[in-house]
Image (spheres, grey):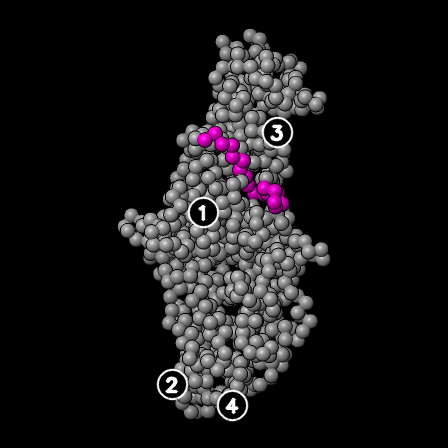
Amino acid sequence: MQKQSNVALDADMIKITEARHHDPFSVLGRHIKNNHVQVKVYLPYAETVCFSHNGAALNRVPDTDFFEYNAKEDEQLPAHYRLSWTDKSGYGHENYDPYDFGSQLPEFDQHLFGEGKHWHIYQKLGGHLHRADGLDGVLFAVWAPNAGRVSVVGDFNNWDGRCNPMRSLGGSGIWELFMPDLQAGCYYKFEILNRNTNEILLKTDPYGQQFEFRPNTSSIVIQEKSYVWQDQPWMDQRVRHNWLHEPMSIYEVHLGSWRRDNLGNFLNYRELAVQLVDYVKEMGFTHIELLPVTEHPLDASWGYQTTGYFAPTSRHGTPDDFRYFIDTCHQNSIGVILDWVPAHFPKDSFALARFDGSALYEHEDPRKGEHRDWGTLIYNFGRNEVKNFLLSSAIFWLEEFHLDGLRVDAVASMLYLDYSREQNDWIPNMYGGNENLEAIDFLRDLNTVTHDQHPGTVMMAEESTSWPQVTRPTWTGGLGFSMKWNMGWMHDILSYMRQEPIHRKYHHDQLTFGMLYAFTENFCLPFSHDEIVHGKGSLLNGMPGDEWQRFANLRLLYTFMYTYPGKKLLFMGCEFGQGTEWNFNKALDWYVLEYPHHQGLQALVKDLNHLYKKHPALYQHDFDYQGFDWIDCHDSQQSIISYRRKTEHEDLIIVLNFTPVAREQYRIGVPAAGTYTEIFNSDSGYYSGSNVGNGAALSEPTAWMNLPHSISLTLPPLGAVILKL
């Protein structure tokens, strides 16, 4: 840039050159001066500038990068003039003047956003292809109410914040700029001036829908609405679907480490649409749950430190590639649930942290605005625009990508103001309690809005405390979630299973305690990624005993989960007995499937999935007492439990032996006379078990365990059997 001469500049022009003017449209563009039209442009890299329509030159203001044109009295300029200019290297450029266009964002959208009720604000804020006065371009808009100046910078203006300062829309806190001629594919960020410190902040678009491959962080303008969906039958059926009474067996997946190519690179969403979908379909799972694919800079965060709440990560391809993946899942009758993280966000300087120089998305006070344990920031749920940002993100994934639900991460950390905090490191609510009232309101709004806008979708809470009514309707005082992870059951069962079998009789209550609260919420039973990281080892190696016993224990554990009330979730690799702790940085150890024990475990999970889907008794009444009865929960000395799963038309008998001793002539009560056929045995030789079983058992008219009939069984060691009349 040439040296500026302040002699020729007024105060407004000085602010433009110093990139600190909050209203560049008052200076640049077309204005009436002394009853004549004057055009003023600021082009720091231009040598000469003229109008494209008639070649008339704009005159440089001496010693500056301003160019002016004063129209003659009777001269008519086009509705929107086009500028031709050469830069200092002699290259020619041509474009419409962005400062010759009026405001593009309707006041109604600004008002709804300020109210926190614009569910589709992602269609307005960010960088979107836009048509103004018949001309195509990109409309940029960003919320930064405390900024001194905001510019859009990108590969179209040398990333120079002086070139394209944005228009402030006043009280809404939104800045906007329509840039004609720009097309999909351009890279951009927002350059923000901290009005208190004059610090220059370079930020990615909070509403960006595509980002560069990490570690680069620029936002990318996308071609929206270009994908043609083929899943309408699934979407129509989902609206009518009552998932409460249907099977739901979820395969939890981290896309970056499920499989990789021969060079160790990430698979593309379209490759996953073949490999992962075929595998899940063959294994019989009904749903895939994805660890966050929302854009994130750090692989080691597994996606839980999100910076792009409206963008699938570019690690696996484009947004349309991700749509293809979900579309393929739906065409193969597989639902897709996404892990979604409204509880916290990272401190990365290029993202949301102190976005406009102030604590905009977070709280200023770290006692409310920071998670010490995780080194992340907490959303200010009491600010309408922040709440709207998160609500519209939820709607975005359900609507734009046809997702079938969201699993909301770390809900407990949102509910409690003193979550994982020292005694004097938190601020009570207005009533003196530790409940985060603003977060509670947000969660209720989240579930109300998503269920209203997209009926049939599932909202699932990872909530690890005894907070009441997590899955009860908001109008009864509940939070309104569809389901809650049953963390208590999971911890109890894993603690029990890790005991040596000889000691299990002293911990029998861990098997049975969960039934005291099993129907207080709509529960999902999770053996998730959290149980095989941070030194916990794999599920397989957490089991006691020699190799045979470890596999038998794991087969027994899975049979217990699939026959216990609640929907099912299993993390990838657990289905075939991954031996090592999960490593996000490489593919699963698929080679272990060369060995019989691993093959047998995989076959067992596959058969359990198909058995589960085949028998309504195992899923129809997951959330009420009608579907479950204990036969015997008291046999702690032999570590055996037995129960019924039932509907009005089907009754299954499940017996589990948690010791490595086969039990012969073990009598249990049954509800009716007849022959009870063994339809599943976790100790089958097909699963690399010892093949101890029954085939069929004829009932006797001997009352037992408060039931009118009974049968005598042989129980396999560390095994479970399922029988049907």
Report the span colored magenta: 197-217
Q: Is residue 197 above or below residue 587?
A: above
Three-letter residue code for mark 1 = Leu
Please say whether residue 716 is one of the residues in the magenta stretch: no
Mark 2 and mark 4: span between their CA atoms?
21 Å
Closest to the observer: 461 or 225? 461
- Amino acid at dot 3: Asn
The earlier-in-sequence mark between 2 and 4 is: 4
Marks 1 and 4, the one that precedes in the sequence: 1
Whether residue 415 appears in this view of the structure is no
Q: Amino acid at mark 2?
A: Asn
User: Disc number at residue 664?
Assistant: 4
Are there few (<14), some (14-19), or many (20+) residues within 10 Å of tag 1?
many
- Quadrant of the rendered image containing residue 575: bottom right
Residue 551 visible in the shown view = yes
- SS assignment at label 4: strand
Q: Residue at x 54, y 71 (%)?
A: 542
Quickly name the residue at label 1: 377
- Would you name the residue on which mark 3 appears? 157
